[in-house]
Amino acid sequence: MKTILYVDDEVSLGLVVSRFFERRGDRVHVARSVAEAREVLEREEPTIIFIDMWLGTESGFELMSWIDDTRPHMADTVTFVTGAVVDPNSTEMMFKTLGRPVIRKPFDITRIIEAVDDAEKRVGA
């Protein structure tokens, strides 16, 4: 059984991801803000963490920075999710600098499955 943290302020996407993976037998936590995600991460160590880049007034980079500072061993489990229009000279460079995988919205659930399977291989879960 894998544990997934999906951080996104879009409630419907969180429900889709949650329902799909729970039917597969995985544990899923859905957080709608950086604060909710921190609460989960203070008591859990997910196999993979999906972070939406833009969480209303917050940024997924804020959460990533907190993970790097307080839970560095979990940094490699992060995959960003974004629906933002990407300017190849700015946002894309940030993603490359962070060295994290990115899944673009709207996404097919198979992209999320692949990311979970990849993370599982990396951490040996």
Image (cartoon, helix red, strand yellow):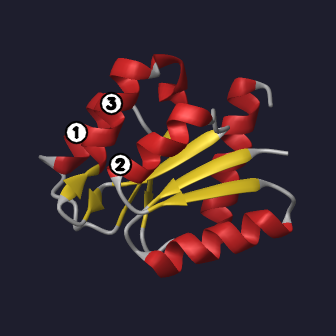
Question: How far apart, in angstroms, are the residues tagged by discs 1 and 2?
Answer: 23 Å
Instruction: Say which quadrant the N terminus sits in.
Output: top right
In the image: residue 76, left or right of residue 56: right
According to the picture, the residue beneath numbered tag 3 turns out to be 66
In the image: residue 123, left or right of residue 26: left
Give residue 48's quadrant in the image: top right
17 w.r.t. 117: above or below: below
According to the picture, the residue beneath numbered tag 2 turns out to be 35
Q: Earlier in the sequence, mark 1 or mark 3?
A: 3
- Residue 63: percent from the left, percent from the top? 33, 40
Give residue 111's quadrant in the image: bottom right
Q: Earlier in the sequence, mark 3 or mark 2?
A: 2
* Amino acid, disc 2: Ala
Residue 36: tell me if it is visible.
yes
Residue 98: tell me if it is visible.
no
Q: Nearer the viewer, mark 1 or mark 2?
A: 2
- Residue 114: percent from the left, percent from the top? 68, 52
The foreground one among 40 and 9 is 40
| Residue under the image location 34 percent in, 49 percent down | 34
67 w.r.t. 58: above or below: above
Residue extending furthest bottom?
Answer: 12
* Amino acid, disc 3: Trp
According to the picture, the residue beneath numbered tag 1 turns out to be 94
Question: How far apart, in angstroms, are the residues tagged by discs 3 and 2?
Answer: 11 Å
